[in-house]
Amino acid sequence: MVASSEIMQNISHSLSSYLFSKNLRIDHYSKAQILEKLSPLLGLVYLENDSNPVIAFLPHQYLLMSESELTCFKRDELHYYHKNSTINSIQHFVQFRQAETIQPSNLFQGGYIGFVDYNHAAEQSVKSEVKSQPQFYLGQYDSFIRYENSSWIFVSHEINAESIFELIVDLLHSSTKTDHQAFQMLTPCEARWSKTEYQNAFQKIQDYILAGDCYQINLTQEFQAQAKGLLIETAEQFWALTNAPYSGYLKLDDFEVLSCSPELFIDFKPNREIITKPIKGTMPRFADPVLDQISKQKLIDSKKDQAENVMIVDLLRNDLSVYAETGSVQTTKLFDIESFNQVHHMVSEVRATLKEEAHPFEVLMSALPGGSITGAPKIRAMQIIEELEGSPRGAYCGSMGYFNYDGTGSWNILIRTIQKQADNVSIWAGGGITISSESEAEYQECFDKVSALLDLINTYYPSNPQ
């Protein structure tokens, strides 16, 4: 890949040896409190990153796709951005270089953070309707804070790092509450589908399976509401619902994504190693340890869930093999059980080694949407999803994550996710449908996954809304 001279200058700016690092001394704040205080900053994003949290802001430049139009913006001063017409594609924007030394791949070192929504990813293969909100965002971040050694550390590779640091300190220590409305639900968050409508969609999938169109479809349904204020105000309670290792948050003007995802999509490790951990198979948790163990054992013994899981493992092996060295794709774990606060999940693991010429971002985009949230065969599954679900998923079932400049990084699957565009709030949940699925059980699985989120968000709906 050949970059223009201006692009190379931008890269050189970001990869300079300059490093400014300083302890913020804000350990008394929660992650949600930090994000709320920093909410005025453009491109505010947080990733839990498997217990290595990072919060980034004020990207050096960023790509945004909205209404199917891709635009690049570059920062002139601390708060001001202009359109950068020299970059007109994702391929020109994302540039990697070989690291001089191997850095820890589970730490953000500076690079690219963003999200890809489900419908934007699906459009690579099928005609897909998109939501009236951002479909793709990728920022080039050279200033950020990360949690290490029990402290939040400000890190910057920018020449004006001290000015950015002073701005962050002022915002974090300001006693003035940020100027926005308190979050409040204007309507309760409720299912868009009736139970009968879900059953009708379920039956159509069974008909498609019997006709030989597909083996599995990940059928999801939307829960929607109206709300005002910033979604970030719910984050502390939201993240407390689960010990999700791949949770995240993103704010772009009046668009917010708040996720407590437990699912890794692809981990890009040093030496071109990649790992994917598809989830397929869910059972509810119980406070009673005996009932909880029974539920977990039921998942362990479920031939149906094992069949679903192995279908998705095979699909992901196929997706990754296009970019992997011959013979390197290996299923290293099959049908492991991982337990979270609300549910038990069946999780498998696939590892591979990328070919030397493989570009990590192209690998990510080629593999999206993740097979665990589409079905098999993948393209036909996406077509059926488009036909039956009746509304674009948006950020839900897309991916959020990061790349360091050396190509290492980590991207999740955006499940257990709330998205808010202006006053519109939506939460989705679903599961894989196969020939052995039962409509009542699959319908209940949706609520097993989403009930805690609905209960929480609806506490913000007053009995007498103003």
Image (cartoon, grey):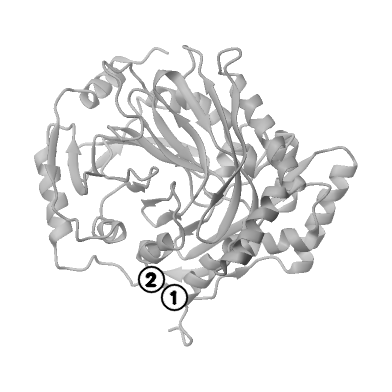
Q: Alpha carbon of mark 1 to alpha carbon of mark 2: how far? A: 7 Å
Which mark, residue 183?
A: 2
Q: Residues within 10 Å of mark 2 (few under 14, many from 20)?
A: some
Is 307 displayed left or right of 170 in the figure? Answer: right
What residue sits right under mark 1 in the picture? Answer: 460
Quadrant in the picture for the N terminus:
top left
The residue sitting at 33% across, 71% down in the picture is 181
Is 34 displayed left or right of 357 in the figure? Answer: left
Q: Is residue 137 visible?
A: no
Instruction: State which quadrant residue 109 falls in.
Output: top left
Element carrying mark 2: loop
Q: Identify the amino acid type marked 2.
A: Phe
Residue 65 location, x and y as percent?
Answer: 46, 40
Quadrant in the picture for the C terminus:
bottom left
Sequence-first tag of 1 and 2: 2
Residue 144 location, x and y as percent?
Answer: 24, 41
Instruction: State which quadrant residue 372 falls in.
Output: top right
Is 42 displayed left or right of 342 in the figure? Answer: left
The residue sitting at 12% across, 31% down in the picture is 159
Element carrying mark 1: helix
Is 308 displayed left or right of 400 in the figure? Answer: right
Establish if 328 lies above or below 311: above
Question: Of residues 233 and 254, which is closer to you in this image?
Answer: 233
Question: Of residues 197 and 22, which is closer to you in this image?
Answer: 22
